[in-house]
Image (cartoon, rainbow, N blue to C red):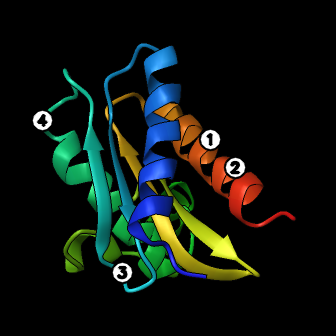
Amino acid sequence: MKINLTIAENIANKCFEKAKKMNIPMSIAIIGNDGKLVHFKRMDGALPISIELAPSKAYTAYSLRMTTEKLKTLTKPGEMLYGLDTSCENIVIFGGGIPIKFNNEVIGAIGVSGGSVQEDIKVAEFGVKFFENRYTTN
């Protein structure tokens, strides 16, 4: 399975609805299986920095095959990925980026930015759950 534009739009729209219910203007980015941006959506009033952070969170989650929240620990001094955030462009080491998996294979990622780290994670997790319920169950 691939994340095409229709799937990416559907995921982003569900994330948008969740953020709207939380009353937090956010930016939402969906990366496809080639590591490139498939869809981007920004709510009115979202912080300008979220335009850059949401796609970077998605890219990080996709390229490292893990949540950006997990990287917070792995990039500390003495840890296995120490220095990654300063040596690689577009790497974000705080929550809001989550890989999208199909049959245990990473096929894309969601990046959310605009709220607190926990709020970004909540919206991104909502998007992943939507994908799993809509596209991976029979």
As drawn, the residue found furthest toward the left would be 48
The residue where tag 1 is placed is 126
Q: Are marks 2 and 4 in contact (CB under 8 Å)?
A: no
Q: Do the residues labelled 2 and 3 touch (CB within 8 Å)?
A: no
Q: Nearer the viewer, residue 14 or 56?
A: 14
Percent coordinates x, y for residue 28 in the rendering = 35, 46
- Gap between marks 4 and 3 measured at Cα: 23 Å
Dot 2 surroundings within 10 Å: few (below 14), some, or many (20 or more)? some
For residue 95, say whether it is visible.
no
Q: Residue at x 31, y 59 (%)?
A: 39
For residue 25, say whether it is visible.
yes
The residue where tag 4 is placed is 48
Percent coordinates x, y for residue 122 in the rendering = 58, 36
Q: Looking at numbered disc 1 in the image, what kind of residue is underneath it?
A: Phe
- Gap between marks 2 and 3 measured at Cα: 20 Å
Dot 3 surroundings within 10 Å: few (below 14), some, or many (20 or more)? some
Q: Residue at x 36, y 80 (%)?
A: 35
Percent coordinates x, y for residue 132 in the rendering = 72, 58
Q: Can you say whether 89 is above or below 6 in the image?
A: below
The residue where tag 3 is placed is 35
- Gap between marks 2 and 4 measured at Cα: 27 Å
Dot 1 surroundings within 10 Å: few (below 14), some, or many (20 or more)? some
